[in-house]
């Protein structure tokens, strides 16, 4: 347990340090022309989520490096259609940078800050966190194939207990009152997970490009193994597909 | 004191929001300044950003910790000394368990053991049986308001040992009657095999298959298409079970998810009141019967040793209900009967209590003798 907490703190600081090169407005990905992109995505969160984001290409100082600022929203669509888990969404804003070395090796990095909102049977949750994503691989004539690793950490979550959740605190001491009440408020470091897998990016047609991430997710929990965790909704795999549309030449 | 604590917590929350907002704004301001490279006070801004980031981190660290007793889920007996508890020694560890006793101490003892993802709260109506028995209920180690324990202490051997220790405390030298529901019915079955002389009558409410082959006969019982399950999936991105508190809190949602298809109507689940579920205990037990994704276990060894009366209780709708108990379990015991509970799924106590209590009273010796 202690090791876990220590790891979380180390990773937090590591994220800050790794984010610093991004501040220097480096790099490049396969997207090196145009001024902005719209991206529509499908993700495996809650079985199926959709996202919409805008990426703004920041002019780089060199041809083989580029960086982008982006902001977007993700909505778990199946959950929305089911009519429960109302107002579930995630807002992202971040910075992405990448570079091409020796003409065929690509390195890509991305830092997102996110805010989520989710109402469920246990209450309403508003997490804020950071996601650090790195990829390395080969650039072919038009496409990119590589591996990625991402670290997702929720810095704090605001919890408002539901009536159902509060009910569990009642009638604990017969004829008496328990000294504990459910605490609404901010809880720190509520989640941490690492994803890793394969990334493929390629221009599709005209102004469009496709980015696919397929991989595994480890929830960094000593309490759940990969299969056991499925019972509480922690799937050990992830899929993310994004279609980019270049707004202008 | 509590009010002061809440006030400080709120203050920290507000401070955190303020610092986060400031920090994010400065982060982007800094990027712009750096990219433009037209401003001479970049270095000053950089220092300013570092300071705000440090303050932001201190804000995060001043938030409530998820494992703070009683913050996310009710505190356990080792954290709240006001709760009734006794210490028992199981697997070489002394642990506190939360318990309740009803009825005259001179009466025969009846143990009532809760199932998984539960505690004794839902079973409290059965204190009605205290008119003829001394009814003892407790939250098993790792469950409810009892102390949380390690994986090793949740082994099947330790669970049987726990029953033996509780019996030594409440009914030394006297036979007991015992009721177990779901997972506890399995532990009771093992207790009967290992301590056949200690039990007068046993009631097994919907144990799942006592042998792997019995379980193989069941179709999938998981329903992953429910909105409850999708909500739990979405929750995974911001609540990782790093400690017992988060795990138990998240498992509370499982009770309302309909993922386990044990009910007559999966869209309208029956109530199941709990204080705190034992998430780690369930995960440990379930992984204990699986080997490479397949069931590999046999709890029936020695079951024939028990020659007392056994009442198997099975509901109409549960996949491990009446038909399952009749087909697979009734023949395992020398003297077993099966009670069918109509219009009910696995949560028999809250779904059809009148049928259950009548059936129990017809079976239990203290009631028969009183007639």
Image (cartoon, coloured by chain):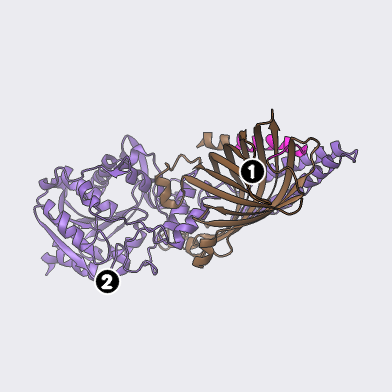
The picture quadrant where one finds residue B180 is bottom left
Indicate left or right for B339 with B32 as reference.
left
Indicate left or right for B315 with A110 as reference.
left
Asked if disc 1 and disc 2 are in contact, CB closer than 8 Å, the reply is: no
Task: Tell me the residue at 16%/49% (across/down).
Answer: B174
Say which colour chain B has: purple
Label 2, secondary structure: give it. loop
The residue closer to the viewer here, B35 or B154, is B35
The residue closer to the viewer here, A40 or A223, is A40
User: Would you say residue A197 sits in the magenta stretch?
Assistant: no
Chain letter of disc 1 in the image: B
Chain letter of disc 2 in the image: B
Q: Is residue A152 above or below residue B360?
A: above
Q: Where's residue B318, x and y in %?
A: 27, 62
Q: Which chain is brown in the picture?
A: A
Q: Main secondary structure of the magenta part?
A: helix
Residue B61, numbered circle: 1
Residue numbers of the magenta segment: A9-29
Q: Residue furthest top?
A: A102
Q: Is residue B342 above or below residue B169?
A: below
Indicate left or right for B274 with A152 as reference.
left
Residue B343, numbered circle: 2
Distance between the alpha carbons at the discs numbered 1 and 2: 51 Å
Q: Is residue B15 visible?
A: no
């Amino acid at each position: 347990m202690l090791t876990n907490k220590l790891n979380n703190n180390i990773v937090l600081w590591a994220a800050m340090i790794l984010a610093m090169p991004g501040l220097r407005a480096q790099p490049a990905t396969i997207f090196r022309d145009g001024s902005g992109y719209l991206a529509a995505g499908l993700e495996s969160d809650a079985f199926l989520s959709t996202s919409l984001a805008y990426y703004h290409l920041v002019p780089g100082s060199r041809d083989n490096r580029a960086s982008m600022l982006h902001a977007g929203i993700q909505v778990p669509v199946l959950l929305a259609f089911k009519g429960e888990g109302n107002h579930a969404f995630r807002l992202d804003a971040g910075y992405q940078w990448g570079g091409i070395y020796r003409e065929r090796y690509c390195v890509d990095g991305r830092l997102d800050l996110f805010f989520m909102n989710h109402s469920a049977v246990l209450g309403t949750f508003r997490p804020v966190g950071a996601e650090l994503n790195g990829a390395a691989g080969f650039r072919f004539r038009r496409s990119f194939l590589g591996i990625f690793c991402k670290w997702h950490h929720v810095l704090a979550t605001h919890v408002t207990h539901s009536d159902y959740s509060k009910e569990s605190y009642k009638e604990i001491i017969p004829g008496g009152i328990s000294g504990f009440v459910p605490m609404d408020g901010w809880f720190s470091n509520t989640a941490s997970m690492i994803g890793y897998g394969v990334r493929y990016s390629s221009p599709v047609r005209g102004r469009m490009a496709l980015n696919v991430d397929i991989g595994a997710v480890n929830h960094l929990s000593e309490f759940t193994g990969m299969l056991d965790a499925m019972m509480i909704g922690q799937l050990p795999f992830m899929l993310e597909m994004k279609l980019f549309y270049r707004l202008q030449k | 004191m509590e009010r002061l604590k809440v006030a400080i917590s709120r203050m920290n929350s507000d401070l955190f929001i303020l610092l986060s907002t400031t920090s994010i704004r400065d982060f982007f301001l800094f990027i712009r300044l750096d990219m433009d490279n037209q401003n001479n006070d970049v270095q000053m801004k950089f220092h300013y950003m570092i300071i705000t980031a440090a303050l932001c981190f201190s804000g995060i660290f001043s938030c409530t910790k998820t494992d703070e007793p009683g913050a996310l889920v009710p505190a356990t007996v080792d954290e709240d000394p006001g709760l009734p508890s006794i210490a028992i020694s199981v697997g070489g560890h002394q642990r506190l368990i939360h318990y309740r006793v009803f009825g005259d101490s001179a009466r025969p003892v009846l143990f009532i053991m809760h199932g998984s993802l539960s505690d004794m709260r839902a079973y409290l109506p059965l204190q009605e049986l205290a008119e003829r028995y001394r009814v003892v209920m407790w939250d098993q180690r790792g469950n409810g308001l009892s102390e949380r324990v390690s994986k090793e202490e949740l082994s099947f051997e330790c669970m049987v040992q726990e029953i033996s220790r509780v019996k030594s405390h409440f009914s030394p030298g006297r036979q007991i009657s015992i009721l177990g529901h779901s997972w506890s019915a399995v532990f009771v079955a093992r207790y009967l095999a290992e301590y056949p002389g200690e039990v007068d009558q046993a009631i097994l409410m919907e144990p799942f298959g006592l042998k792997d082959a019995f379980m193989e006969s069941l179709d999938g019982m998981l329903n992953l298409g429910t909105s409850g399950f999708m909500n739990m999936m979405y929750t995974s991105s911001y609540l990782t079970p790093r400690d017992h508190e988060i795990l138990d809190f998240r498992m509370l949602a499982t009770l309302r998810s309909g993922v386990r298809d044990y009910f007559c109507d999966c869209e309208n689940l029956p109530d199941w009141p709990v204080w705190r579920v034992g998430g780690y205990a369930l995960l440990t037990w379930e992984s204990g019967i699986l080997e490479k994704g397949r069931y590999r276990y046999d709890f029936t060894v020695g079951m024939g040793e028990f020659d007392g009366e056994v009442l198997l209780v099975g509901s109409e709708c549960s996949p491990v209900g009446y038909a399952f108990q009749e087909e697979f379990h009734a023949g395992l015991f020398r003297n077993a009967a099966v009670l069918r509970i109509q219009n009910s799924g696995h949560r028999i106590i809250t779904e059809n209590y009148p049928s259950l209590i009548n059936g129990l009273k017809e079976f239990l010796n203290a009631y028969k003798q009183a007639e």
